[in-house]
Image (spheres, grey):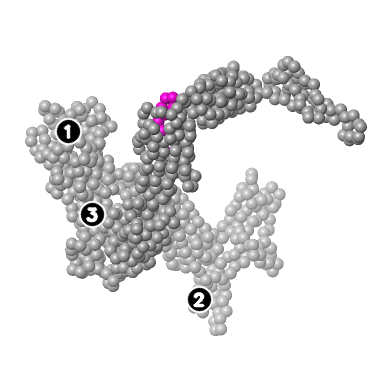
């Protein structure tokens, strides 16, 4: 009980708390320690550090918040800033503590998070959610519960929660057939008042919708409550489908740049389409305060199954509908042991005829039929003949249309039986005839936004000039990189941005692109070729024209000798040739990028040199593959010269292995790196220009190069077996073969040089002692020591075996 003094009559306020004792067993581990021999300590705290009661003093509401415990008796306890809100008590002994508290102004609050925000699942699958409820307020809450009407498994009774506490759990929604937004609401009480928080998670079923409706939000510019030609669609408005109880059915959708949206209640019935109001706009169609229009939709399943005879089973399924709603893809199935399916028919509503079918994108073999004759399905629609039947796993058939249609209840039929046809028809989801639902609004005051056009040029020092325009009015003339129209206030709606060539500038010399960003929300998009851009009320749209200067590549052919055929090239520039005697070709107006250029090799000719003049040195050349990989930057010209010489030579590297290695052999050469199989093999380089080439074998653990033998007609090639190198001197028309012989073991040698006295005086004789040891794994030969100041006798004339000293 707290007594509050007052000038007149004081008051007593009863503050109630519930204490909690965590009684631990006295056998085994003691989580809180042991103060009394082998008995385990216990933990005492408050279920809630604030009571459900408050007191009002001078019009201000307070409650008493328990800060924590300080061990000791009354009168001896001192407040500690590091106080904790629990007390550890010893078993079978007296435990004294003081409780410290403070008056605070209550700030109750509750929060809930439901994750993940979006789950995409297959139809009939389950969705799992994690829910975290927290108390971010400064007082405790009581009777905390979570309610989730669409997922009862997520309902929870949590009870009391201290300030700062949180509670997490996992729950599941099962057998999900349609998309839905799942909302969980947390409620907690303080001082008799309820506090709420909600969070929503979306579940998207990865299957075509079975019932949809088209809607359009338009700007009713003349306010007559009806859509007139030329009135633009409104971007960024939210539409929702609601039932008779105003519950939202399916996902709400936001209109696109054309003001259109497709909503999917995915159930048959009577509904209403409602807008979410926006400031500064008045609904004129249908008008009134609800801004809703009634509509009806039909619905049929995605899959239909047919039993035309006792032992024959067939199926038709809508497996995909494209995002633009132009392509409808169905699968036809023929179950095991069934007779071949002769044909199947998809019914088409009266609003769709042959003129609206995109023949190129529609699966071949179709025809429009009025199939009401003997053995027919009785359906008017599109039919595919399947004389060989279809596999059990199904064959797909796409119906491509020239305009989008909503989804509703349709029909599909099958025909089988050959000369004595039998047919059947069943409902299935398909295109339906329904005009878009129109909802119109008029601005209460002229709605405006900001629009700016900017110029970016690559390279930034390009000498081109450009004109920038909004709604065909040039607002910035002859600008270069960084130019802008500045921000211009425009009426909300669709506007056109454009660019033109300035002084002495040709737009064809550039790659051009346009990107727009709504800066207040960070949304970025690419307008279509018309340059039409929607600017909403209060939006700040910046559109940037980027012009990248096209570049050029020149390929030059130099020839030393007389060639009998033209030189062929391939790669990123396409196939082309240069004259046998040499010449060049220029490729202009190229977009920046990477362009490989490869020359086709000709027998007895070698590519003696391949050089590329690149201002930023980004181009790479590979003489071995006769390829230049050009790194072409904006506005850059790269010149590559292929120099060929006649009477080419060849080099062959042979690997001989005396033993059994377990990994391939690797070589580095002037002609590029290569490998040879572990057991041995060879690598041949043909059509090589005369010159010096180095071949180096990479060292391998536990192996050494025992010998290198090169066959060179003029003897100009030298070798270094210890270093594993061959220095090849290739003359015109010459063929050289080098054999690398490898054996197990690695050679190694150590030398220890010692002196007879550490200090040397004039005329003193000094004796040096040399100790040589074969520390490798193979014998050594011709071991000697060279010392500039001392003549040393040969150490070993013959073999110097492993371990010898």
Residue 81 location in percent, x, y?
64, 65
Q: Residue beneath label 3, please?
A: 214
Of the residues tagged 2 and 3, which is closer to the observer?
3
Instruction: Tell me which residue sits at (14%, 28%) in the image.
Output: 417
* Numbered label attached to residue 60: 2
- Which mark sits nearer the N-terminus, 2 or 3? 2
Label 2 crowding class (10 Å Cα cut-off): few <14, some 14-19, many 20+?
few
Residue 501 location in percent, x, y?
32, 58
Instruction: Tell me which residue sits at (88%, 32%) in the image.
Output: 757
The CA span between labels 3 and 1 is 32 Å
Instruction: Tell me which residue sits at (47%, 45%) in the image.
Output: 614
- 622, above or below 237, in the image: above
Are the two marked residues, 2 and 3, in contact with CB atoms closer than 8 angstroms? Answer: no
In the image, residue 593 lies in the stretch drawn in magenta: no
In the image, is 776 to the left or to the right of 236?
right
Q: Can you tell which quarter of the image residue 467 is in?
A: bottom left
Of the residues tagged 1 and 2, which is closer to the observer?
1
- State the SS at label 1: strand
- Which mark sits nearer the N-terminus, 1 or 2? 2
* Numbered label attached to residue 474: none
- 601, above or below 589, in the image: above
Q: Residue beneath label 1, please?
A: 385
The CA span between labels 2 and 3 is 55 Å
The C terminus, quarter of image:
top right
Q: Which residues are magenta?
A: 596-605
Task: In this rendered view, identify the residue nearer to me: 502 or 151.
Answer: 502
Q: Is residue 207 visible to us here? A: yes
- 139, above or below 586, in the image: below
In the image, is 592 to the left or to the right of 667?
left
- Which mark sits nearer the N-terminus, 3 or 1? 3
């Amino acid at each position: 009980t707290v007594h509050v003094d007052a000038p007149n009559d004081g008051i007593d306020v009863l503050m109630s708390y519930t204490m909690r004792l965590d009684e631990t067993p006295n056998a085994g581990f003691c989580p809180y320690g042991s103060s009394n021999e082998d008995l385990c300590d216990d933990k005492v705290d408050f279920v809630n550090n604030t009571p459900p009661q408050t007191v009002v003093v001078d019009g201000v509401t307070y409650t008493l918040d328990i800060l924590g415990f300080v061990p000791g008796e009354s009168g001896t306890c001192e407040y500690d800033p590091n106080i904790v809100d629990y007390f550890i008590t010893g078993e079978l002994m007296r435990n004294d503590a003081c409780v410290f508290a403070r008056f605070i102004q209550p700030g109750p609050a509750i929060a809930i998070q439901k994750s993940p925000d979006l789950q995409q699942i297959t139809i009939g699958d389950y969705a799992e959610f994690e829910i975290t409820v927290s108390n971010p307020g400064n007082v405790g809450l009581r009777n905390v519960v979570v309610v989730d009407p669409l997922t009862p498994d997520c309902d929870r009774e949590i009870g009391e929660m201290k300030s700062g506490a949180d509670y997490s759990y996992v729950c599941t929604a099962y057998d999900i057939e349609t998309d839905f937004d799942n909302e969980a609401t947390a409620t907690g009480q303080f001082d008799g008042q309820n506090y709420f928080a909600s969070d929503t998670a979306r579940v998207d079923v990865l299957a075509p919708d079975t019932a949809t409706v088209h809607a359009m939000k338009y700007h009713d510019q003349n306010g007559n409550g009806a859509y007139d030609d030329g009135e633009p669609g409104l971007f960024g408005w939210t539409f929702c489908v609601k039932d008779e109880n105003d519950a939202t059915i399916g996902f709400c959708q936001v209109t696109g740049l054309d003001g259109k949206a497709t909503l999917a209640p995915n159930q048959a019935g009577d509904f209403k389409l409602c807008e979410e109001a926006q400031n500064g706009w008045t609904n004129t169609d249908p008008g009134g305060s609800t801004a809703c229009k009634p509509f009806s939709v039909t619905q049929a399943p995605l899959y239909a199954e047919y039993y035309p005879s006792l032992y024959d089973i067939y199926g038709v399924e809508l497996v995909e509908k494209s995002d633009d709603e132009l392509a409808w893809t169905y699968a036809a199935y023929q179950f095991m042991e069934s007779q071949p399916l002769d044909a199947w028919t998809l019914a088409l509503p009266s609003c769709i005829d042959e003129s609206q079918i995109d023949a190129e994108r529609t699966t071949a073999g179709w025809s429009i039929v009025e199939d009401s004759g003997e053995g027919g399905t009785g359906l008017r629609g599109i039919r595919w003949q399947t004389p060989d039947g279809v596999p059990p796993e199904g064959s797909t058939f796409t119906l491509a249309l020239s305009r989008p249609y909503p989804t509703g209840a349709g029909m599909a039929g099958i025909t089988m039986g050959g000369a004595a046809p039998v047919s059947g028809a069943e409902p299935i989801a398909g295109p339906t005839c329904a005009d878009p639902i129109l909802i119109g609004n008029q601005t209460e005051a002229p709605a405006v936004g900001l629009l700016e056009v900017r110029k970016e040029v690559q390279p930034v020092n390009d000498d081109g000039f450009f004109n920038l325009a909004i709604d065909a009015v040039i607002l910035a003339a002859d600008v270069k990189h960084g130019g802008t129209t500045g921000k211009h206030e425009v009426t909300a709606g669709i506007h056109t941005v454009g660019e033109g060539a300035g002084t002495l500038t040709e737009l064809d010399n550039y790659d051009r692109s346009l990107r727009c960003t709504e800066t207040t929300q960070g949304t970025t998009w690419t307008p279509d070729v018309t340059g039409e851009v929607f600017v909403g009320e209060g939006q700040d749209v910046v559109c940037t024209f980027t012009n990248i200067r096209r570049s050029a590549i020149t390929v030059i052919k130099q020839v030393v000798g007389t060639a009998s055929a033209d030189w062929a090239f391939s790669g990123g520039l396409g196939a082309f040739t240069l004259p046998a005697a040499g010449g060049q070709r220029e490729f202009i107006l190229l977009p920046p990028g990477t362009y490989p250029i490869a020359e086709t090799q000709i027998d007895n000719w070698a590519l003696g040199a391949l050089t590329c003049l690149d201002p930023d040195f980004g181009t790479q050349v590979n003489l071995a593959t006769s390829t230049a990989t050009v790194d072409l930057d904006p506005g850059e010209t790269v010149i590559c010269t292929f120099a060929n010489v006649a009477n080419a030579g060849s080099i062959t590297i042979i690997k001989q292995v005396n033993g059994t290695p377990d990994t391939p052999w690797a070589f580095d050469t002037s002609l590029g790196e290569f490998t040879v199989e572990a057991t041995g093999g060879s690598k041949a380089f043909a059509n090589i220009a005369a010159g010096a080439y180095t071949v180096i074998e990479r060292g391998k653990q536990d192996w050494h190069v025992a010998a290198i033998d090169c066959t060179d007609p003029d003897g100009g090639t030298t070798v270094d077996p210890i270093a594993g190198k061959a220095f090849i001197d290739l003359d015109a028309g010459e063929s050289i073969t080098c054999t690398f012989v490898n054996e197990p073991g690695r050679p190694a040698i150590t030398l220890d040089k010692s002196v007879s006295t550490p200090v040397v005086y004039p005329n003193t004789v000094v004796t040096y002692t040399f100790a040589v040891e074969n520390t490798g794994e193979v014998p050594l030969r011709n071991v000697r020591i060279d010392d500039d100041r001392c003549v040393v006798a040969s150490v070993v004339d013959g073999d110097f075996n492993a371990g010898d000293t």
